[in-house]
Image (cartoon, rainbow, N blue to C red):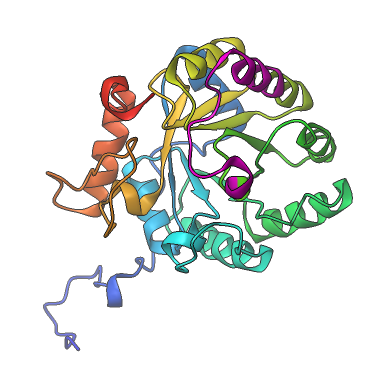
Amino acid sequence: MTAVTDSTPAQHATPYGTLPPASPLPSRKPISLPRIQEMRARGEKITMVTAYDATFAAVADAAGMECILVGDSLGMVCQGLHTTVGVTLEDMAYHTRIVARGLRRAQGTAWLIGDLPFGSYQESKEQAIRSASVLMQAGAHMVKLEGGGWTTEVVHFLVERGIPVCAHLGLTPQTVHALGGYRVQGRGDLAADQMKKQAHALQDAGARMMVLEMVPAPLARELTDELHDCATIGIGAGKGTAGQVLVLHDMLGVNLGKNPKFVRNFMDGASSIRGAFEAYIAAVKNGNFPDDTVHAW
């Protein structure tokens, strides 16, 4: 341990790389749904990253990230599961709580989204609001759920009761077994038409954000142009969406296997995690990421 001496600065270092006991006032106003809609309307790209603990969330916020998603991807990158199906509501509540705590300690202003895990909203609208309430009480500002069609009624039910909802179309990892693997969705006229109908229905039900995962870039751009009240967030869907999201571990190169096509390692050339976040934000904002010729279909 480092001894404290008379020469130790007033702002002491914190142990184990944790958060400082007091943080400066935030340099921006808190991100809110109206602010996200304003960004979408003026064409400013929205940045999002997943985070699963207090420190990474605080650093992402300090770098300027607008949105943080506590994704059920934690099952694969933190828990070692093969899919997200095994993640429980208790898991999601725990990680949402510690991310929210990290943001509060650092006086963070990012918009915090919590994933509703598999089995926590499929049974009924009543089950969905009980599950969503758990994540909201843990600190989420919005919940995310996967799929279209039957989920429209669930989205409407939640939004009517004051719970903001982010939809998720395209590759929906919770139903990866039904989809036949991690495959691009929305190819062909019939599949594209179905996705368009689902997207518009979800927007009409009140969804104000929508993740489009592994969707052909032309279709994602078309949906973005059509959905005036719902900000699309792409992952493997090209640069035409209103914003982008990446899994934390992927964008930092923390991966022993082969990265998906849509991933870029932002630690390349960065001297710190915060620097990698800042590079990602800049690349999304100026249109350098994603590159449709490299990262999209």
Q: Is residue 155 left or right of residue 72?
A: right
Q: Quadrant of residue 23?
A: bottom left
In this rendering, position of residue 19 left or right of residue 112? left
Residue appearing at x 67%, y 37% in the figure:
147
* Range shown magenta: 176-199
Q: Is residue 55 above or below residue 235?
A: below
The residue lying at 80 percent from left, 40 percent from top is 158
Residue nearer the viewer, 28 or 11: 28
Instruction: Indicate left or right for 111 with 239 as reference.
Output: right
Residue displayed at 75% across by 42% down: 163
Which x, y percent locates residue 225?
54, 10
Most prominent secondary structure in the magenta stretch? Answer: helix
On-image quarter of the N terminus: bottom left
- Relative to the observer, which residue lies in front, 264 or 99? 264
Residue 129 at x, y percent in the picture: 81, 50
Q: Is residue 223 above or below residue 20?
A: above
The quarter of the picture where residue 11 lies is bottom left
Task: Let me know if residue 46 appears in the view.
Answer: yes
Quarter holding the C terminus is top left
Q: Is residue 180 magenta?
A: yes
Question: Is residue 141 visible in this depiction of the protein?
Answer: no
210 over 1 or under it: above or below: above
Q: How many marks?
A: 0
Q: Nearer the viewer, residue 33 or 172?
A: 172
Q: Going 65% across and 15% down the picture, which residue do you hit?
A: 193
Task: Tell me the quarter of the picture where residue 281 sits.
Answer: top left
**In x, y percent, where is residue 226?**
60, 10
